[in-house]
Amino acid sequence: MSELLSALAGWGVNIAIAITALRTNLLRSILTTLGVMIGVFSVILAVAVGNGAQVSVTQQIATLGSNMAIVVPEPERANGPPRPGDRGRLTERDGDAIARQVPGVNAVAPQIRTSVQMVTGGRSASTQAIGSTEDYASISNLATEDGRFLTKSDVGAATRVVVIGQTVADKLFVDINPIGETVRINRVPFTVIGLLESKGSNLGTDNDDQIIMPISTLRQRLSTGPAQGPDDVTLLFVGFEDEEALVAGDREIKSLLRARYRVSKGKITPFTVRTTKEIAETSGQVTQIFQAVLVAIASISLLVGGIGIMNIMLVSVTERTREIGLRMALGAKRRDIRNQFLVEAAVLCIIGGAIGLMLAMLAAAIFQQVADFPAPIGWDTALMAIAFSAVIGLAFGGYPAIRASRLSPIEALRSE
Amino acid sequence: MTAPLLETHDLVKDYVIGGELVHAVNRVSLRIQRGEFVAIMGTSGSGKSTFMNMIGCLDVPTSGTLLLDGIDTKTLDSDALADIRNRKIGFVFQQFNLLARTSALDNVAVPLIYAGVRAAERRERAQAKLEAMGLANRMQNTPAKLSGGQQQRVAIARALVTDPLILLADEPTGALDSQTSLDIMGIFQKLNDEGITLVIVTHEPDIAEYAERRIVFRDGQVIEDAPVTSRRRATAA
């Protein structure tokens, strides 16, 4: 216990010596610290931005809805990417078959989309029109803030009704309730029956800039582009009861559609199935790589900061050779001298690290305000920053400190 | 008779300078008893400083034996030598060698840091030694605010703070005027009267006359070793 106390007291003395030495060359100390400060600042900010990307992607996937499979008419080869000439195909009837035959399916919503121009009362807006069914709301986590969503009879009768997003409502309707109003969509009159709750935006994509109408209405009244057949869809949303059903259903959908399109094993399928689980995993990996690359680049500046520390510590040792000799004459052991210079380097680094961390927190807060992008800095990141800078101090201060401790007392004492 | 405090047998220190081997100290054998006041004299290059550095455990002999307080220093590693310098030897230098921007009190306390003494006790012991040197009202002054004589007295207080067996002073008056030199020699004589062993290196014959034994070096060897016949006394400041 007393040994521990005296060891701690020894470090206390070293810290006092280090602070005196650093204050003696204040400007030089500040400039040296600057290197570490910038290094820690950039590494922490990189970690924060990486974390932010991860949070953002998770949120985006959550807005898609959970436990969902997405089937798209994109050809998929068993090995390698599709080639030109591979054809994709997916129809509403495929969706009906999935709903009937795959176990654990709650609902299937087909989707087709087209760009439209909307006009009302002298105002206009261009947006994306989505054609789907009454099940679209529950599968893709949509809710109406006002009015109602599509019903089965809307879809069956191909009525000219539309549910609009917040952004569209803001563009077209000022100071009036849009519910019940008539809008012209590509010159066809529609009645607004509902207003969607806002879903915000992810990474620059506005989730509220869309309108939803019955898929039958969209097919009959609006042009859907030249390539599509009368029954084709741009995608199918398949909602499952739970994750277990999703994992099993993924395989079921594939084999069902293979059978429907008579695709033998190993051949190109005209469709691709993705589950929200896969998407989450893939984007998790992508953001991790993104973060690793950012941190790696930022680490270079930390390395440069560390080299700066080493440079200055070498100068410091050379300048104070006589002092080292004197301390040795007065009884300092090699480890005392080594620790003195290690502590000096560590103090420089920890001060730089702490300031760098504070600046990174400030920058992250500004980033969050201005760019509306989360950049969280947790306690673990903060602790990592401090530990990191201490390690830099020990690693780059180590060589100069050991060099100082190896000096011969008499040669050090004689130096001028 | 008790063992001598310091004993050397055929002590040799060789240097290679410009490709030529130089015997800085060449087979020196002598003894210094407890309580002696020895002046080592010689011209520059005579080997007196090299000898002093070896008996101060700052420099390692090329060959020969050095016994300090009965311990053969050849058997000691660098940590053990540091310990001996800390506990058994006090150094006084020509240029004082005080830490700049550090108070007299903190300067005197430095050896106690390496002895592992607690802060409060360090302060107490450093204070006592400074008071004994007549510097009670200068403790917080940095070296820049002290005269040469005062700085050398701080250095002596620092040398004494671990209560060493022997004080080694290398040209302790070399940077001081004659009156201040006299004061310092008075302090040394007083310390010697109190029982401490003293070895000073000097090239000034006057200064050597304050010691009780004079050893003269030339070309790395002792050419004279005799008691000081007409010993001077200085009244302590």
Image (cartoon, rainbow, N blue to C red):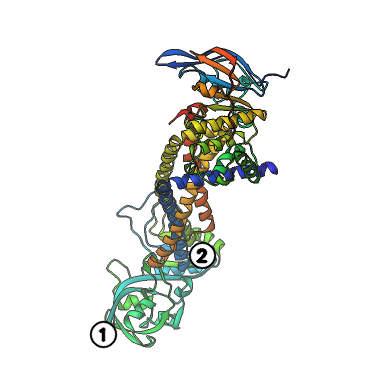
Decide which of A414, A367 is in the foreground and name it. Answer: A414
Please state the horizontal and vertical placement of residue A294, each as a whole percent of the image.
Answer: 41, 51
**Quick check: A322 above or below A34?**
above
Q: Nearer the viewer, residue A223 or A229?
A: A223
The answer for how far apart the CA atoms under marks 1 and 2 are is 43 Å
Can the viewer see residue A99? yes
Q: Hey, what amino acid is under mark 2?
A: Asn
**Circle 1/circle 2 CB separation < 8 Å:** no
In the rendered image, residue B52, in percent from the top left (x then y), is placed at 55, 22
Query: Circle 2 marks a residue in which chain?
Result: A
- The numbered dot on residue A67 is 2
**Along the line of sight, the residue nearer the viewer: A392 or B61:** B61
Please indicate, yes or no, whether residue B10 appears anywhere in the rendered image.
no
Q: Looking at numbered disc 1 in the image, what kind of residue is underneath it?
A: Gly
Residue B123 quadrant:
top right
Between residues A45 and A216, which one lies in front from this camera angle? A45
Label 2: few (<14), some (14–19) or many (≥20) C-alpha neighbours in 10 Å = many
- Quadrant, the N terminus of chain A: top right
Mark 1 or 2, nearer chain start: 2
Q: On the rendered structure, is B108 left or right of A288?
A: right
Q: Where does residue A273 sit, x and y in percent of width and height?
A: 44, 60
| In the image: residue A150, left or right of residue B75 | left
* Quarter of the rendering occupied by the C terminus of chain A: top left
Q: Is residue B223 above or below residue A282?
A: above
| Label disc, if present, on residue A181 of the rendered structure | none
Residue A111 sits above or below residue A312 on the image: below
User: Which residue occupies 36% across, 66% down?
Assistant: A204
Q: Which chain is disc 1 placed on?
A: A
What is the x, y in percent for residue A123?
27, 82
- Residue at 46 percent across and 40 percent down: it is A396
Of helix, strand and loop, which one carries label 1? Answer: loop
